[in-house]
């Protein structure tokens, strides 16, 4: 039971990193990405390959994942963000589909559908951190560092420019902000941080395959951000906890067939997204009324 | 000969894509609502047809009519109970998008729970291929889907150019305030756009059910194709969306010459990305500045 709770906590931590990083572009910059699971996956595959083929420790493997993820996000964001918001939605959905095919077809690197098996236990500066409690501490430390970094970024002039762009792009560019560049940088920061979650995930399971990076995962992360509250620091963390505790709670309902739980979970958060958008667009943790929200994010 | 075969297959798939993308483009053009739940209308009408025609042996005209009614009702209900309440307090791209996305998530899982998560096809003699030339196989369904696509586009351009509702719809896309000044109800016109835009996907959904087959996640693929075709054709241009859909269908099939079928979505992405880089305004769109 204790192991179960620790494992669940680690998964919540990893997903909280994903939600917090997606919220950085979704909530603060108003950029909508459907490909967050792909950057999660790039981080996971890069870290796994770095550890298996080159014997990298956790820090080096994570850094490699962040680098690859950042470069690929740059290639996506640079052209797509030049035009309009709808284009990035379409381009990110396209990337989600394309990258998934690459994950399952590039067998020499990703192991194809079967995935990568036998990722070595994580080592950090010579210490073995594969013990669940230590690994939970590592996950929470990563989450903490990312939260602090994002808080600092949001409060910097970079973050204020992003919020200005979200609220009124024309006005921001009239004030001399390089809108496309700022947005591209935001996507790069978010994608590199998402790769940290991927690295943690790969070392945690010591096995990864395509299943963990499908569109449903991107959507699930979006649901976490929306349910928790966009544009708030802790909202996405709470959202991640709610969404991941949901299936665990559903298993206690006696009359549900176990095969339908995944489907019911998705229906519940799909419905939650619809109802929240109609009645409380700021999410559970967000600003109280839609009037406040209008001032914060029209 | 392989080329000709792939080209013909591409025309058929392109006709289906064009029919799908046109509905999305019509709705987006006139109401400015980014209706990503459009793929759900496709899935719903496809599954209704499959259930009636293949499970209950209902005659095809009745099943088609039921599919059209289901798609139109879905569009109408979305406008009435999702988009309108949201737009009453906040009309940002973001809120509308999330709500529509949530709906498509619910529909996809609902279909999966009710009809099963496997591939479902409607068997019909029309999809049996006949060798018309040495090594060239064509099924009657190809000719039918291309013919129906041409028919629907002719009807649609007549509708948009000659009827009052059609003209009002085009007016709504250009200037909603002026529509109100002329004494028309923009909400009513928007409802028409949703009804017609959703009903137009039905032929594509039925032909897909007869050829490639349906699965609950098909809405996502339809969504990607509709978005890509709309951007490739030029946002707001119905004619452009039709051409974009046709181009994507052709590109996907011609790629089979060298690539395996699992790369079909990759081809869509490459075409979309090439347009975003080199011609962001699409075939028929007016150049749009960064917004």
Image (cartoon, rainbow, N blue to C red):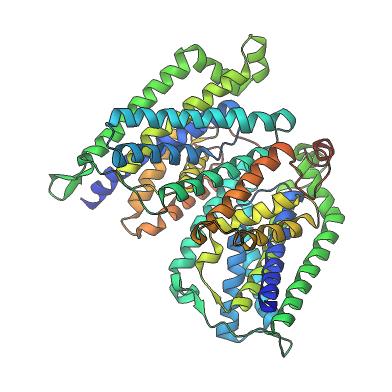
Q: Is residue A17 left or right of residue B25?
A: right
Which residue is the extreme one toward the bottom?
A: A126
What quarter of the picture does the C terminus of chain A occupy? top right
Indicate the quadrant where residue B83 lies.
top right
Can you give x and y, in whole percent of width and height, for residue A66 in the image? Answer: 67, 69
Tell me, yes or no, if residue B49 can be seen here.
yes
Q: Residue at x 57, y 49 (%)?
A: A267
Can you give x and y, in whole percent of width and height, for residue A247 in the image? Answer: 61, 60
Q: Is residue A167 left or right of residue A264?
A: right
In the rendered picture of this protein, how many numbered marks are placed on residues?
A: 0
Which residue is the extreme one toward the front?
A: A254
Can you give x and y, in whole percent of width and height, for residue B190 in the image? Answer: 58, 23
Tell me, yes or no, if residue B246 can be seen here.
no
Can you give x and y, in whole percent of width and height, for residue A95 in the image? Answer: 54, 55
Please state which of residues A245 and A292 is positioned toward the viewer in this rendering.
A245
Please state which of residues A246 and A194 is positioned toward the viewer in this rendering.
A246
Q: Residue at x 46, y 62 (%)?
A: A101
Indicate the quadrant where residue A255 lies.
bottom right
Q: Residue at x 59, y 40 (%)?
A: B100
Please state which of residues A117 and B150 is positioned toward the viewer in this rendering.
A117
As drawn, A242 above or below A208: above
What quarter of the picture does the N terminus of chain A occupy? bottom right
Which residue is the extreme one toward the top?
A: B183
């Amino acid at each position: 039971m204790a192991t179960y709770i620790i494992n669940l906590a680690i998964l919540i931590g990893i997903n909280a990193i994903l939600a917090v990083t997606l919220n950085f572009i979704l909530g603060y910059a108003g950029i909508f990405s459907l490909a967050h699971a792909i950057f999660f996956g790039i981080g996971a595959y890069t870290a796994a390959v770095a550890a298996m083929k080159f014997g990298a420790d956790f820090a080096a493997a994570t850094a490699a994942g962040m680098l690859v993820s950042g470069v690929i996000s740059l290639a996506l964001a640079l052209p797509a963000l030049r035009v309009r918001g709808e284009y990035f939605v379409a381009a990110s959905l396209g990337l989600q589909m394309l990258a998934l095919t690459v994950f399952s077809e590039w067998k020499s690197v990703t192991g194809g559908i079967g995935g990568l098996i036998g990722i070595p236990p994580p080592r950090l500066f010579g210490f073995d951190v594969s013990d669940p409690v230590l690994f939970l501490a590592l996950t929470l430390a990563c989450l903490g560092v990312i939260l602090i970094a994002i808080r600092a970024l949001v409060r910097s002039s970079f973050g204020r420019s992003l919020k200005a762009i979200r609220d009124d792009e024309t006005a921001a560019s009239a004030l001399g902000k390089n809108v496309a560049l700022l947005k591209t940088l935001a996507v790069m920061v978010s994608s590199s941080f998402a790769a940290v979650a991927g690295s943690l995930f790969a070392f945690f399971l010591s096995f990864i395959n395509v299943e963990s990076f499908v569109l449903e995962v991107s959507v699930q992360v979006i649901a976490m951000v929306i349910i928790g509250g966009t544009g708030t620091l802790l909202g996405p963390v709470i959202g991640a906890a709610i969404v991941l505790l949901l299936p665990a709670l559903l298993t206690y309902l006696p009359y549900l067939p176990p095969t339908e739980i995944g489907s019911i979970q998705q229906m519940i958060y799909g419905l939650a997204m619809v109802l929240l958008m109609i009645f409380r667009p700021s999410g559970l943790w967000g600003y109280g009324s839609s009037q406040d929200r209008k001032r914060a994010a029209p | 000969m392989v080329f000709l075969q792939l080209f013909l297959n591409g025309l058929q798939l392109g006709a289906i894509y064009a029919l799908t993308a046109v509905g999305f483009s019509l709705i987006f053009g006139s109401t400015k609502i980014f209706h990503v739940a459009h793929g759900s209308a496709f899935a719903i009408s496809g599954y209704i047809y499959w259930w009636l025609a293949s499970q209950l042996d209902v005659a095809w005209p009745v099943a088609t009519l039921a599919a059209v009614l289901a798609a139109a009702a879905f569009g109408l209900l979305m406008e009435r109970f999702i988009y309108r309440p949201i737009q009453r307090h906040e009309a940002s791209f973001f809120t509308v998008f999330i709500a529509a996305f949530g709906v498509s998530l619910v529909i996809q899982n609902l279909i999966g729970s009710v009809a099963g998560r496997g591939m479902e096809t409607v068997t019909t003699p029309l999809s049996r291929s006949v060798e018309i030339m040495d090594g060239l196989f064509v099924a009657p369904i190809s000719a039918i889907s291309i013919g129906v696509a041409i028919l629907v586009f002719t009807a649609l351009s007549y509708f948009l150019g000659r009827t009052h509702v059609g003209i009002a719809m085009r007016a709504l896309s250009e200037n909603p305030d002026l529509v109100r000044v002329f004494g028309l109800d923009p909400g009513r016109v928007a409802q028409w756009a949703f009804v017609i835009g959703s009903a137009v996907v039905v032929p594509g959904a039925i032909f897909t059910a007869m050829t490639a087959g349906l699965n609950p996640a098909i809405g996502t693929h339809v969504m990607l194709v509709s978005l890509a075709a709309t951007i490739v054709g030029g946002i707001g241009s119905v004619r452009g969306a039709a051409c974009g859909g046709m181009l994507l269908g052709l590109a996907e099939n011609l790629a089979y010459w060298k690539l395996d079928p699992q790369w079909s979505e990759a081809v869509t992405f490459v075409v979309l990305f090439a347009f975003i880089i080199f011609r962001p305004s699409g075939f028929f769109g007016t150049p749009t500045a960064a917004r």
